Image (cartoon, helix red, strand yellow):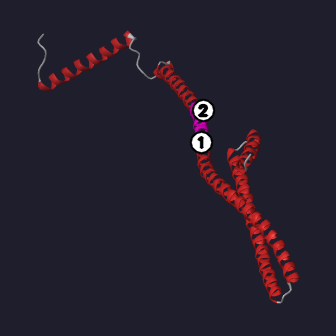
Amino acid sequence: MGLIARVSTIFKSKVNNLLDKAEDPRETLEYSYQKQVEQLQQVRRGVAEVVTAKKRIELQLNKLQQMANQWDQDARDAVAAGRDDLAQEALTRKQSVLSQMQSLQTQIADLEKEEHRLQDAQQKLSLKVETFRTQKEVIKAQYSAAQAQVKIGEAFSGLGEDMADVNMALQRAQDKTAALQARAQAIDSLTEDSPLLQLNEPSTGDAIRDELNRLKGSTSVSDELARLKAEMGKTDPS
């Protein structure tokens, strides 16, 4: 299993466990993002360590190269001096150094392969982290918007219940007002028909009083007519 696959498997396992327990998905997303960033940092540290190790070996290789060159020169000097025995020893030392150099070159080649592999993994993981970060922000924004919509919906729902209570209270007030108005009208009607309010009004049903009043009126007119004739010197014919 490759490095990316192992990282992905571990990440999915931890995220699934967290999703089962988390209440706010935004916290889960932030946790997941931080874990991916940590994994990316680990890969970057791995690349840096490989590069450092390769540089260290390259320094050793350069030193061995200098030693091999020195032994080669020593062998030449020994041959020039007629000391073949010393020349042979110098060449033997040179071969030993060259063998060590070959081993270091193999290690450098392996480290370069590891460096390329880690750099490729770093590039892919970095792209995944950036993609996840973008998606995370989008999902967080969508969640916040949905949360706001839920709160608004709950507020409107509560407002509807409050308005229902207000309408009921208004209807009760209107009913009580109508009942009170009807009661007032009934009281007014009873008051108008009360005998107490009719004591100072003449009774239209008293026939004797009416007749007496007419007689009084008739007598007054006769008296006034007689007085007028007397003034004018006229009398009624006998």
Q: Magenta segment, which residues?
A: 148-165
Our reading of the magenta stretch's main secondary structure is helix
- Please give left or right for residue 87 compared with residue 217 in the image: right
Q: Which residue is mark 2?
A: 161
Q: CA distance from mark 1 to mark 2?
A: 23 Å
Q: Which residue is mark 1?
A: 146
Query: Label 2 sits on what residue type?
Result: Glu
- Please give left or right for residue 34 compared with residue 187 in the image: right
Q: Secondary structure at mark 1?
A: helix
Seen at 26% across and 20% down, the residue is: 220
Please tell me whether residue 117 is drawn above or below residue 100 in the rendered image: above
Question: Looking at the rendering, which quadrant does residue 161 occupy?
Answer: top right
Along the line of sight, the residue nearer the viewer: 112 or 65: 65
Residue 157 in magenta? Answer: yes
- Please give left or right for residue 37 compared with residue 141 in the image: right
Q: Which mark is residue 199?
A: none
